[in-house]
Amino acid sequence: MTAAEKLTAELAAELDEMASKGTLKDLRVYESPQGPEVRLKGLGEVVVLSSNDYLGMADNPAVIEAGVEALKEYGAGTASVRFICGLFEPHLELERDLAAFLGTGSALTYVSCWTANHAILDALSDGETHIFSDELNHASIIDAMKLARPGGKSIYPHSDMDALEAALNEHADVKRKLVVTDGVFSMEGDLAPLPRLVELCEEHEAVLIVDDSHGLGVMGETGRGTAEHFGLHGKVDIITGTLGKALGGAAGGFVAGSGELCRILEQRSRPQLFSNGLPPTVAASARKSLNLLSEDPGLVARLRDNTAAYRDMLSEAGFDPIPGESPIVPVIVGETSLAISISKQMLSQGVFVTGFGYPVVPEGAARIRSQVSAVMRPEHLERAVAAMSAAMKSATTS
Ligand SMILES: Cc1ncc(COP(=O)(O)O)c(C=O)c1O
């Protein structure tokens, strides 16, 4: 057996083990754009509550049109990294609008928020940097810290501000302190305790970095994010976020902060230097989404109303979703295989909601995570609750 054959056999055994444990994920294939109702290959029409398309931008005709126009005008891209061949006008327009929307001096885009988080933590860390990070931060932050190799790091228990304060006191003499948190935690749907975070960072001269991927376009009266929700717009030092959820739904990410920060990142963050920029078509679509949101904050109000209605319907049906204010509505079911089996049964009834298990969430805390969108109608939410009730009943009685 060659080394490659041996590797393939090992991987096949791993896949078999996942299949026998019921944890192997099947990926769906779309035959229509993302939206509250889609057509899935082999499954037909289904209602979707597993997408981050919180504002329905992925299928918005103006967003699609903006992308098509940019593709025609600028082509696919520069076929190079930004520092070698430069960028297109849509990049500058998007970055300018993002900075204005978020109240920061500047913004810089990347091909994903995953990359943006890696870029910022790596570029700002050296042996005299200490990073303080919530234990439930997104995987991109966890991995970014490994890559950044700061002088030290403290992982504080989820949202435990006393623990963060103690860690800040313990490392009071460190030259550069970075506190990093998700704005909205993607698996729980809860919000970072931003008022206390801002206070602690001011008291301890730490820089606050908030990844607001699930908060942008979602939280706050006008969708400016978790900071706006808490009345702290403009008080977060650095915001990172994705363009692959509420702000367009395709891909892309950014860092928003001071002009100096973005210029330094452009000069020396490794993904800027060694990886292509955002395709101009994606930049144009994301900018259009942002503009639509700025023009119609009613979109965010509709999202809030739909979320409240869905939570009420779930409670009436006997479910006990994790409490929260975001449109992420998780219902804990326990074992990973149970979550996967419930989501499969729901899909067979025409409702697409993902079950999450270990290692994405802690063992024993597997969940069915629904995500609500501003463009859903009551019948979508009703169908989801009915399917969840039927699937839960059948899974727990079989
Ligand atoms: C909090 C958070 N940060 C970053 C990311 C990564 O975003 P992207 O898809 O743009 O890489 C996600 C996506 O799941 C996320 O939820």
Image (tube, rainbow, N blue to C red):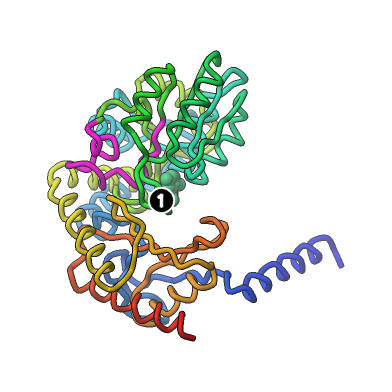
Type of the residue with mark 1: Ser
The percent coordinates of residue 283 (x first, y second) are 33, 43
Query: In the rendered view, would you say 363 is above or below 348?
Result: above
The percent coordinates of residue 261 (x first, y second) are 41, 22
**In this orientation, does residue 77 appear?**
yes
Query: In the rendered view, would you say 297 is above or below 152?
Result: below
* Camera-side residue of 144 and 341: 341
On the picture, is 363 further left or further right than 100? Answer: right
* Camera-side residue of 255 and 308: 308
The percent coordinates of residue 198 (x first, y second) are 35, 26
The percent coordinates of residue 11 (x first, y second) are 71, 65
Circle 1 SS class: loop
Q: Quadrant of the N terminus?
A: bottom right
Q: As drawn, which residue projects farthest toward the right? A: 1
On the picture, is 207 further left or further right than 217? Answer: right
Q: Is ligand 1 less than 8 Å from the beta carbon at label 1? A: yes
The residue that label 1 is drawn on is 186
Residue drawn 62% across and 20% down?
Answer: 127
> How would you classify the magenta stretch by its main secondary structure?
loop
The part of the chain drawn in magenta is 209-231
Few, some or many C-alpha atoms within 10 Å of disc 1 (few <14, some 14-19, many ≥20)? many
Quadrant housing residue 10: bottom right
Residue drawn 18% across and 47% down?
Answer: 292
Is residue 123 found inside the magenta-colored segment of the image? no
Is residue 216 found inside the magenta-colored segment of the image? yes
